Image: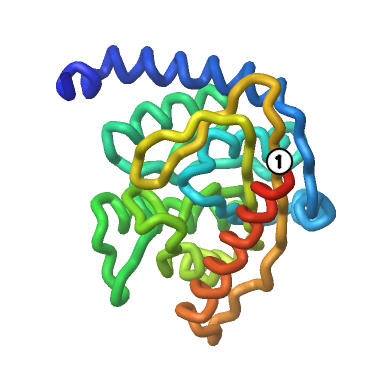
Amino acid sequence: MKFLFRSAPVQWLLGLLFAAYLGVTLKTLRWRRDGMADAEAVWDAGGPVMVCFWHSRISLSPASWPLERAQEPRALISLSHDGEVVAQAMERLGFPAIRGSAAKKQHQVRQKGGAAAFREIVRWLKDGNCIAIPPDGPRGPVETMTNGPAMLARRSKAQVLLLGLATKPCVTLNSWDRAVFPLPFARAALIWERQPDVADDDDIEAVRQAWTERLSALTRQAEAAVE
């Protein structure tokens, strides 16, 4: 059965169906949007920007980014077989993937594809574009950020937006991240928060901890908003 779901034709079909479902469903959600001034200031200023949201909220993330107004996006998606389906769906929704992982540990890339992904993201950001990163992916621990995003922001001088997302009612998978999938006409919320730029002499671990706490707090706020 695993072989079947990992075949290219099946992954193509699943990606198509996933994109079609999200493309319709996200437009029906009853959105509450907070912190828009932070996001709009970044869109209007232009230049490189990195957006972080927890892995469990990937299905909601396309609704947050106005393709006709904001910087051109790419999404960091893992090289896993599940990631292939997500990557195909996101590309159909206007968010082509950079495949791999930006996670680093002790200044060495540990995850497959990490070194190439890191370099590609830096080049993409330095051209004034956007990268969307679920910083606890692809295997967790859940809502635990690696040092990768802070290192990317420091290297690329990108602006950083954290994004809390939630929807209710929804389908919650029995996966490591408890991934949520929206249901048509459900309540939904997104909350933006701009973070200070990462300077060359900033403590990366301190930045990681601060961003982790803020991203979880924003996610809890979004969840409360749809209760």
Where 36 sits versus 24, above or below? below
How was the colour assigned to the protein in this rendering?
rainbow
Indicate left or right for 144 with 25 as reference. Answer: left
Where 194 sits versus 206, above or below? above
Q: How many marks?
A: 1
Between residue 128 and residue 1, name the one nearer to us. 1
At label 1, the amino acid type is: Val
Residue with the mark numbered 1: 226
Where 207 sits versus 47, above or below? below
Indicate left or right for 143 with 225 as reference. Answer: left
The picture places residue 42, in percent across and down from the top left corner, at: 75, 55
Q: Furthest-right residue in view?
A: 37
Tell me what residue is drawn at x 69 percent, y 36 percent: 188
Q: Furthest-bottom residue in view?
A: 201
Tell me what residue is drawn at x 61 percent, y 66 percent: 214
Between residue 125 and residue 55, name the one nearer to us. 55
SS label for mark 1: loop
The picture places residue 12, in percent across and down from the top left corner, at: 35, 17
Q: Quadrant of residue 72?
A: top right
Indicate left or right for 89 with 126 as reference. Answer: left
Tell me what residue is drawn at x 63 percent, y 57 percent: 162
The picture places residue 48, in percent across and down from the top left corner, at: 63, 56
Please indicate, yes or no, whether residue 156 appears anywhere in the rendered image: yes
Q: Furthest-front residue in view?
A: 227
Tell me what residue is drawn at x 53 percent, y 34 percent: 59
Quadrant into which the N terminus falls: top left
The picture places residue 41, in percent across and down from the top left corner, at: 81, 56
Q: Residues within 10 Å of mark 1 (few under 14, many from 20)?
A: some
Quadrant into which the C terminus falls: top right
